Image: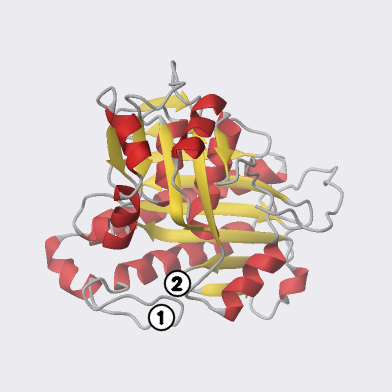
Amino acid sequence: MAQLRASAPLREKPIVPMNPDLPSLTLDHLVLRYCRQVVMQAMDHVRGRMREENLPALRCRVGNTNVQKSDENPTTAIDREAEDLIVRELQCKFAKIRGIRAYTIFSEEMGIRTFPEGAAETDADLVVFIDPIDGTEFAESLQGGWTLVAVYDRRANEVLAAVAGDIFLDRLYWASKTGYPECLDFITHSWFRLDGGAQPKTTIEGARVNVLTTKVDRYRALSEQTRLLDAIRAADGRVNLAWGSNTLLQVAAGHADVAIEFDRGFATYDILPGLYIGLKTGLTILDLDGRPLTAQLDIDDIFATFRRDPQHPKRTPFVAAKDPALANQILELLNRK
């Protein structure tokens, strides 16, 4: 991802909460704390709403000029419900942090909007990227789905915090500027730091490879990668279905060896939480030309691309693995057009 053309110096003083009962924390710790709370609230809401009697209403089509889907795969009401909850709770949480004048929220459903109401986008220090339900078609059938939030400091040109919640496995992944990448599993009551696994693979043979193949076009694109598939099959490897930040987070947790998206790339609100957490974990994440990806964004370009054509936001393809040799091996095997 391209860097911004200019950046302001980092803040030297911690931002303190307006609530005197909260301890004095740096900005990234406060933002992380509140984003974790908001993501957990959204996860609980989605799980509670996915009862059978609610599904007909949740599957109704919701008008959205930013998203174009077929009637068989509509933009559903549950996306909008979850997004409204996240936006509402972020407004409540960020109001407690002294020093945040304004912030811009960017999501597929809502587009680009600055808060508090009436604030100018140029006044926003922070940009919050959200995807209320990444993988809605899986959430509808209770097969999966993630809630994603990443907060970017536009002045310092860096991510402050990122949180990703696995809705139905009830796991929370996060990382922040001055903190470690971590995961909390609420089902098994276990906590662990993300390190890419105890023995990360160094070659593609026998690897567990995360790809997005939910649509025929993406599946066809993967099926054409014969050299890559033959290499994976050489030692009984596996191709795992994943999507968005989930592809990267599973590698960060050591549940998969590789994450690949070479066909279309992922929009920023889909990839940024997983990209940031993966980089903090120490993953090697490359673009298709072999250049390392960073979590530094050209916000102006991202916004301008979206405003020109909301149905075609700026997208990022990538290859990710813990071991650099494995990431580079995948690039050598890809048949690029």
Image position of 139 with respect to 324: above or below: below
Residue 187 visible in the snapshot? no
- Numbered circles on residues, count: 2
Classify residue 219 by image quadrant: bottom left
Q: CA distance from mark 1 to mark 2?
A: 7 Å
Give the residue drawn at x 35%, y 24%: 205
Spot occupied by residue 15 in the image (x, y as percentages of width and height): 75, 48
Q: Earlier in the sequence, mark 1 or mark 2?
A: 1
Nearer to me, 248 or 326? 326
Give the residue drawn at x 54%, y 78%: 309
Q: Circle 2 is placed at which residue position?
A: 109
For the residue labelled by badge 2, is the local secondary structure a helix, a strand or a loop?
loop
Nearer to me, 30 or 146? 146
Residue 334 visible in the snapshot? yes
Q: Circle 1 is placed at which residue position?
A: 64
Spot occupied by residue 143 in the image (x, y as percentages of width and height): 22, 50
The circle on residue 155 is none
Spot occupied by residue 165 in the image (x, y as percentages of width and height): 41, 46
Image position of 329 with respect to 158: above or below: above
For the residue labelled by badge 1, is the local secondary structure a helix, a strand or a loop?
loop
**What kind of residue is marked 2?**
Glu
Categorize mark 2 by other alpha carbons within 10 Å: few (<14), some (14-19), many (20+).
Answer: many
Labels 1 and 2 touching (C-beta < 8 A)? yes
Give the residue drawn at x 36%, y 83%: 63
Horizontal arrangement in the rendering, residue 85 relative to residue 50 (left or right) = right
